[in-house]
Amino acid sequence: MKKIVMSAIVGTFSGALLVTQVAGPLVAQEVEAEESVYQQLDLFGDIFERIRSQYVEEVSTEDLVTAAINGMLTSLDPHSSYLSAKDFEDMQVQTKGEFGGLGIEVTQEEGYIKVISPMDDTPADKAGVLAGDYITHVNGEALLGLVLDDAVEKMRGPIGSEIIITIVREGTAEPFDVSIIRDTIKLTAVKGRVVGNTVVLRITTFNDQTTSGMIEELNKGIEELGGIENLDGVVMDLRNNPGGLLNEAISVSDAFLEKGEIVSTRSRIADSDKRYNAEPGDIAAGKPIVLLINGGSASASEIVAGALQDHRRAIVVGTKSFGKGSVQSLIPLRGDGAMRLTTARYYTPSGRSIQALGISPDIVVKQPVPPPVDPDAVVEEKSAVPERSEADLRGSITNDSMTEEEKRLYLEELDRAEESAKLRDEDYQLAYAIDIIKGLTAIAPDTP
């Protein structure tokens, strides 16, 4: 009995010794890491004090601290930054859908300011700024070397004032200047119209008006068509949509999905991972959807495109999206400012990361670039004599296979087809999307 007890005591002691031997280096490493952090903070404090006391000009303590914080955040990725109290307030105003500025969403790429997309009907859009343009100068002052927030601040100014930006554009040999008059940006999140039997929903941003605006515009279109039974399908246009609120992207996707995952987010902290799922109900009643994207479609736009694509609820048409698949958390700080910190990545329902890869369309359709206008070109005048057909000939016999009502419906369908044909000259990608809807309806007319 004594031997057994002694063995147990020896075994316990050996286990304790083993734990101590293993834990010892780990504890030492943690202590060493802590000491390294404190040494780095001491170095920061030393530099901070030397700048304050020895720099050639007196520098505000607040400016130094702000610059240090912003430098630390912007060194991480293009989307992490410090927001002063004013910047934080401006950002909150922007999500409400009205603010002052040029109307462009920008990012920083290898030190250069790149346009993600111009917003519809804004000063930048009307001035011809395009997604993918690089802004190198503002009023003749170079932006290279500035952090993104400082470059954006250079572009801000009083409403009604002029700004001249210098643009470098792929395919254009020389940089060129664009004059823009700053204005109040009033974003209409969703615009709808009926083309043939298709409802086109142009979604320009994801703010707190987007889902409600989309539902309202779709219902208007269905009413114009005389009921959902007359709806061939929906075109959702997310081209040059820079994104916005995550919850709006989720609710827009949910509006067309009956079930399943919409998007998930994954971070370093395992229990912070989130999955967002659809609830039953499809506002388009299963009608075909074609979703348009391009290089200016980013963030929330890519979440919607990825969700509807993975669930085979929409055919995605256009060109590859921007590839901004990271999650930024807004963390309020003392002094009414905030920190925008990248904390996670987005993943589509199939597990694809959007980051840097973007959403690839099911059907790649590029928007043709119109040729430059040649002032010396001879434009042939169209004949004033309208085209004639058999029906225009005097004494032609009538068609006896149709009733008058059937003829009326046939002619209305012909008018709609001609309207779609005209659209190809204005917006080839959109016309292509509408043709897909018509084709799907033609081969499966009884599909609800």
Image (tube, rainbow, N blue to C red):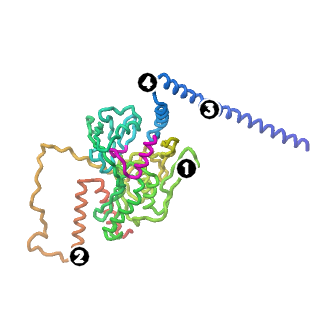
Range covered by the magenta-colored residues = 83-105
Residue at 81%, 40% in the rendered image: 11
Task: Give how far apart the Cα atoms at labels 1 and 4 are.
Answer: 48 Å
| Secondary structure of the residue carrying numbered label 4 | loop
Of tags 1 and 4, which is closer to the observer?
4
Q: Nearer the viewer, mark 3 or mark 2?
A: 3
Residue indicated by mark 2: 405
Q: Amino acid at mark 3?
A: Ala
The one of 95 and 118 positioned closer to us in this rendering: 95
**Residue at x 55%, y 50% (from the top left corner):** 273
Q: Residues within 10 Å of mark 3 (few under 14, many from 20)?
A: few
- From where the camera sits, is residue 215 visible? yes
> Which amino acid type is marked by label 4?
Glu
Give the spatial CA distance, label 4 vs label 3.
36 Å
Task: State the residue position of label 3.
Answer: 33
Q: Is residue 379 above or below residue 48?
A: below
Q: Which residue is mark 4?
A: 57
Amino acid type of disc 1? Asp
Residue 273, numbered label: 1
Instruction: Tell me where residue 45 sits by quadrant.
Output: top right
Q: Are marks 3 and 2 in contact (CB under 8 Å)?
A: no
Q: Crowding at label 2, few (<14), some or many (≥20) Cα neighbours within 10 Å?
A: few
Total marks placed: 4
On screen, residue 191 versus residue 208, left or right, reads: left
Q: Secondary structure at mark 2?
A: helix
Estimate the spatial distance between the alpha carbons at disc 3 and disc 2, rounded to whole Å: 84 Å
Residue 98 is inside the magenta segment: yes
